[in-house]
Image (cartoon, grey):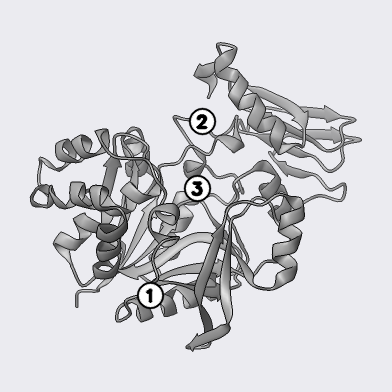
Amino acid sequence: MVSNKYCIIMAGGVGSRFWPVSRNAHPKQFLDLLGTGKSFLQATVDRFSKIVPVENILIVTSKQYESLIAEQVPQIPKENVLLESLKRNTAPCIAYATYKLFKKNPDAAVVVTPADHLILNEDVFLETVGCVLEHACTSDALFTLGIKPTRPETQYGYIQANKSKAEVIKGHACYQVKTFTEKPDAEMAKVLFSSGEFLWNSGIFVWNLKTIKKELESYLPDIAASFSDIAEYYYTDKEQEKVDDVYSGCASISIDYGVMEKTSLCKVFEASFGWSDLGTWESLYAQGAKDSNGNLINTEKVMAEGVKNSIVVSADRDKLLVVKGLENYIVVSTRDVLLVCPRDEKLIKALTADLAINNFGDYL
């Protein structure tokens, strides 16, 4: 029996905040930063294959990662790997997948997800997504998953839910969305957290193709028309050439800003399943297992003396790291880079920005 349930995985990002392990040529979605034996992408494909047939999983990624996709998830059919020639944010990425899949199955309902999330309670996650996906098959709403916040976090965007008017679907609370809020500063994060109205924006969406197609045409007509106009070439040997042409003239815009913040059809399911987007070394530290001195150590050969509350990572399992007398530091060793700096996300961001200026852009 043919399933109408699909998953679209967005796997084209760079993950620069995990530098120097995450690089342009081999970004974080292809890395095993948690030491589980699987990359983030592999874990994501495995997770969703429990509720969606593997042949119904599509991956949208950059052309330069085509071989990495084939190497890491060979079970994904080649026609399901959608290659972007340029980075244009999430709206073109989703539009491409939407219009290609619409040609194959216009009755499809899809869950759209980043490739690099951490899910601690997978059973609850799969039950929640499965419920929303089933509901989306017959609903004309655009759903997103909002995570019940556990702290005033500055690294996530927020969704304000209309909690005065709840809809309960198979035990899950669903609300009309009032507003979307970008990553707040510390004081604003406290206000949002204490209000009880705001949820973390997971960046996971669920909808049926007919609804998202209609809203793309309403709010991003140029992008929608570009991908609609080449529909006859999807699943042919001319698809890539035509898609490249579209991307060359396509605006860079997020699906949040382009559609979700404008549509009246946006609803949010409140969820709690141990979620993190693991976007930074700090988020990895928060979620990872620490030793008795508060250190997150992800390497087999290490001598750490007088080291506290630090992150110690080596991409080379044969290299011995000797670290002494550091507190609240990041130590990351790769084949060609050694990073030693205080645990400060602003420093990492500044360092990566400075590389190109100092003629070290090849190390990005």
Circles 2, 3 touching at the beta carbon (< 8 Å): no
Q: Position of residue 298 (x, y in %)?
A: 68, 42
Q: Which amino acid does the dot numbered 2 rest on?
A: Arg
Looking at the picture, tell me which residue is in the foreground, 109 or 40. Answer: 109
Residue 20, quarter of the rendered image: top right
* Residue topped by disc 1: 133
Looking at the picture, tell me which residue is in the foreground, 290 or 257. Answer: 257
Q: Residue at x 44, y 29 (%)?
A: 25
| SS at mark 1 in the image | helix
* Residue topped by disc 2: 23
Q: Residue at x 71, y 71 (%)?
A: 195
Spatial separation of the CA atoms under disc 2 and disc 1: 34 Å
Q: Residue at x 81, y 33 (%)?
A: 303
Circles 2, 1 touching at the beta carbon (< 8 Å): no
Mark sitting earlier along the chain (2/1) = 2
Mark sitting earlier along the chain (3/1) = 3
Q: Mark yes or no: residue 76 visible.
A: no
Q: Position of residue 245 (x, y in %)?
A: 19, 35
